[in-house]
Image (spheres, rainbow, N blue to C red):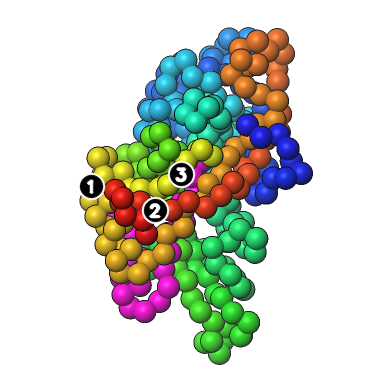
Amino acid sequence: MSENRDSEHIVLEIPWDRCGTLVQRDNRFMATVSMEPEKTEEKSHVHDPGRLRELLYPGNHVLLRKARSPGRKTSWDIIAAWSENGGGHWVLVHSGYHREIGERVIKDGHISPFKGVRRVESEVKVGKSRLDHRLFIGDADVENGNDEVVFVEIKGCTLAVDSVALFPDAPTTRGTRHMEDLAEIARNGTRAALVVLIFHPHVKCFAPNEKTDARFATAFYNAIDAGVEVHPLVFEYVATGMSPRLCEKTKERKRGTGRVVFRKNVGVYRGAEKF
């Protein structure tokens, strides 16, 4: 894990309040965590609809944040989980931050795949779906109709096998529909793009997870053929001063800073073919 803030491109600060060990995943949105150092068990919210089997398994270490909303069933949110893949690193597993990360990237002229973004609209209705963003690119006034428009959908990716990032980690009818919507937009002559936020810093490429969801993979490649842009962006969640070893040895209630750092762009692969 990098700790050199001066050379990092920090996208978002996400602090953590406690570390712990996952006891079990109770259901899709809840897990039991043994909190350090007391070893007391707390029900914690899992804000990600994926399976996360490679990350949220009994005995793995997680970072948590105290819930800010009163009246919730759970007092804690799981922010990140440890992965040994690629030498060991924390993986952001709270999809509630994806929208903000994506929007910050889009507006950041240094790392955005879209140059000259003038305005960003969110939650845009397209047919029976809603896409994350509609971008207006250009210097002209929007009322004159001279801006270039780009429809953008953002997906978070927490699964990596060796050096390949894969999405989805569970079948996604909604994700397939989004790819079909983007493809239709592109066929009609408007720019459309998928931005993939990858949270494994070691990966070298991205591909759809055909074994898990063949329909999504087909829709994904059909969308590329229709002219949809795909931008896989690699990030790392850096938790300052915390590792699984330190989590196990801590004698006090430890909290710390965390940050989502942009690392690189990678390509899209289908076998030996690169798009």
Q: Nearer the viewer, mark 2 or mark 1?
A: 2
Tag 2 and tag 1, C-beta contact below 8 Å: no
Secondary element type, mark 1: helix
Residue extending farthest bottom: 144
Quarter of the image where one finds residue 252: top right
Residue 247, horizontal then vertical, whole percent: 62, 17
First in sequence: mark 2 or mark 1? 1
Residue 204 — which label? 3
For disc 1, the neighbor class at 10 Å (few under 14, some 14 to 19, many from 20) is some
Check disc 2 and report the residue beneath it: 268
- Left of 56 or right of it: where is 42? right
Please determine whether, in this image, residue 47 is positioned above or below residue 249. below
Three-letter code, disc 1: Ala
Q: Residue at x 63, y 44 (%)?
A: 261
Lower sequence index among marks 3 and 2: 3
Name the residue that disc number 1 marks. Answer: 214
CA–CA distance in space, label 2 to label 1: 17 Å
Q: Does residue 171 appear to the left or right of 24 in the view shown? A: left
- Name the front one of labels 3 and 1: 3
Q: The magenta stretch spans which residues? A: 173-199
